[in-house]
Image (cartoon, rainbow, N blue to C red):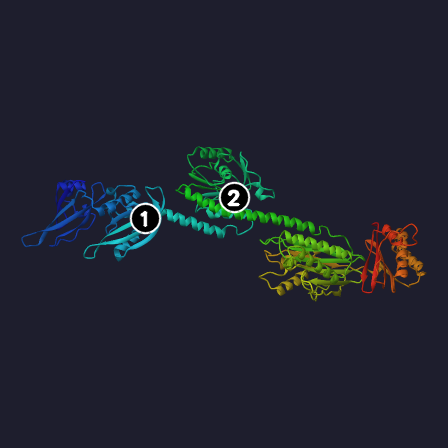
Amino acid sequence: MEHVVAAAVVDARGIVTGWSEGAHLLTGHPAEEAVGRAAAVLFADDLPPLTADPWSRPVVVRHRDGRPVPLAVTACPVLGPDGTPTCWALTAERPAAPEPTLAGRAFQQASMSMSVFDPRQRYLRLNDAACKVMGVPEDVLLGRHFPETVEDAEHSRGFAFHLRQVTETGRPVRYESFTGAPALNREHAWSIEMWPVREDSGEVTGVALAAFDSSEQYWARRRLALLNEAAASIGTTLDVVRTAEEVVELLVPQFADFASVDLLDWVLGADEPPAVPDGPIVLRRVAHGSRHEGTPEAGVRLGDTDAYPPYSPPARALREGRAVLSQAGEPDFMRWTAERDTDTPEGRRHGHGVHSLLAVPLRARGTTLGVLVGIRIAHPDDYEADDAVFSEELASRAAVCIDNARRFARERTTALALQHSLLPRGLPGQAAVEVAHRYLPSGSTAGIGGDWFDVIPLPGSRVALVVGDVVGHGIPSSATMGRLCTAVRTLADVDLPPDELLTHLDDLVTHLAAYDDGADEVAELGATCLYAVYDPVSRHLTLAAAGHPAPAVVLPDGTAHLVPMTPGPPLGVGGLPFEAVELELPEGAVVALYTDGLIEDRDRDVDRSTGELCNALTAPAATLDALCDTVLKAVLPEEPSDDVALLLARTRVLGADQVAAWDVEPDPAQVATARRAATEQLAAWGLEEAAFVTELVVSELVTNAIRYGEPPIRLRLIRDRSLICEVSDGSSTSPHLRRAHAFDEGGRGLLLVAQLTQRWGSRQTDRGKTIWAEQTLEPR
């Protein structure tokens, strides 16, 4: 730059009266335009008032083309005869660039952007890095007001505020800013420091700044923050689809303008993982999201499948097991997006505007589950290697959460199928009670529990009602539940009283625990159980509990209460007895048996829940099924934390017209009398077709009681869905079936009874035993 000296004369009125050629060269204004004009039109700064004191300072002059020109101006007053100033003589120069000093070279060549502004926020000096950021040479910016040189109004306001703050307070400022750089065509993070430039007198005459490009550190912090956020926001539920949606919600719009999660079909089912094929790979879209409403970038609808060709980024990521970067302009990328646009029925251009794509495989525990895809459209930066490293780490975490959800869903499905296969599907027909039931599996992450129930027909038209709950969740709990359910049915077939049955069941649980991983695991196989037997003839309900909640009873008058009973210890504890309770119920009473999941929860009071249960049981309901729904709706929270089993039974009574009984003297001559009485009763019931078999059964059972039993002897006939013949005596010895040899005189009676009747058996009573036989009746 050549050395140019300019001179001008301004009178006391502020009018230019003289203009040199140097001034013409520096400002572009010729003398004929400048002379006679007000100095305020030519100078961007206001000139000091006319005084006798000279001054020298930087002044900005308006160039003829409109741009500001900073000049170092010296003003000397011209005095009149009386010694007062009559005009100003102004000189200005733009010296040629001096030889750079070491400090000058350091400023100009610094890697960070450095600038100097005057107190009015106009550029005085910029180094090469600052000019590169602004995208223009220094000459274009010198003397210009800062806000005029940037397009980002928000950034301009913040920057100008800090410049003004330093000028006014004289204190340095340090802050961070995130904005675009006009010449770099991308968003950058800046660490900016401003400090005042002072004269020797201490006056602030300028503000210097240095801006360090901290974009790499900024994005590293952002990626680390996203990973930390992923740890808290991904995998909040054990649901595969919801987990995929959480991944998309995390990435959009912070990391991608559009993101999608596609999974292999086997992940959503129960199949084993197949090998990744070499050809097109079929994936199912489970989640996607966009920063634009309606996800216009989506080429696949949620739930649909799409075949990815081998050269596409998602297919390459799956085969290669690593993140694949793809940018606009690459042949494979352009070919793939063009084919997707062609195959789309709507004719939308899904690849339009996409300048960068990142596809990452979802792999967990050595198994490939699917692919995560992110694309950038409005985001100015392309994906880079650091983004690929970050996405692989994020995808690894997300894949583990998806695999956990898949494993949980698979185990839950298996446990639920096992549970349903073990629970009674169709309850057997019987006359003792009318039943309805509900089983609700838990939706918690703990998995399916071991709740169960059963209705077991017993001899003499009686029925056993059972509910139980196995400690723990998942398949082991369901398997243990199956063991106990089978054991209860076996013990019920022996027709044991409730307290004795629970004693045997307690021993079984203790032995099962000992057979597994040792005695320390007894608690893991613990369970609770309630076993009740109802007799429709005597209307007696006998029940005992092993650590299980007491049932509720609703009487026909509409009152409800819990059965007062002392529950024994849970099964598997051992060493303590079980106590049976007996009560008499009227016809039409409702007995409610349930598991603790109905009334117990961390946030609920048990007494309040049982009160709600009793109130709900008294609500009007057309059927027992409707009453089940009413109870569950009234007592259960919205999201139960445990399985729930509910069994309702309405009692029936066998009237005198269905039961006939006779006392039998211990005399062989009374056999014929008993046989005749039974035949006459069958005739009264209209069951003459069963008389022949019944006579043989009565003869055999009464004869055995007289010959081998002890008084008192009693014969009873019960007409229900079948015909039941019972003979009771005071002996505790139980008969057994055997095959008589050719020359034996006896031993054929029970074999004959077993062949003529549907089934037979014996049960112990408080006063001896009862032998019974049951015949099927033809429906009328």
Front tag of 2 and 1: 2
Q: Residue at x 56, y 48 (%)?
A: 405
Residue furthest to the right in view is: 669
**Kind of residue at disc 1:** Phe
Q: Position of residue 410 (x, y in %)?
A: 60, 47
Left or right: 159 in relation to 592: left
Q: Which residue is mark 1?
A: 212
The quadrant in which residue 522 appears is: bottom right
Q: Nearer the viewer, residue 179 or 586?
A: 179
**Alpha carbon of mark 2 to alpha carbon of mark 1: how far?**
39 Å
User: Is the residue marked by circle 1 packed among few (<14), some (14-19), or many (20+) residues within 10 Å?
Assistant: some
Q: Residue at x 34, y 51 (%)?
A: 176
Q: Which residue is mark 2?
A: 363
User: Is the residue marked by circle 2 packed among few (<14), some (14-19), or many (20+) residues within 10 Å?
Assistant: many
Residue furthest to the left in view is: 81
Left or right: 421 in relation to 693: left
Q: Position of residue 499 (x, y in %)?
A: 74, 63
Q: Nearer the viewer, residue 310 or 348?
A: 310
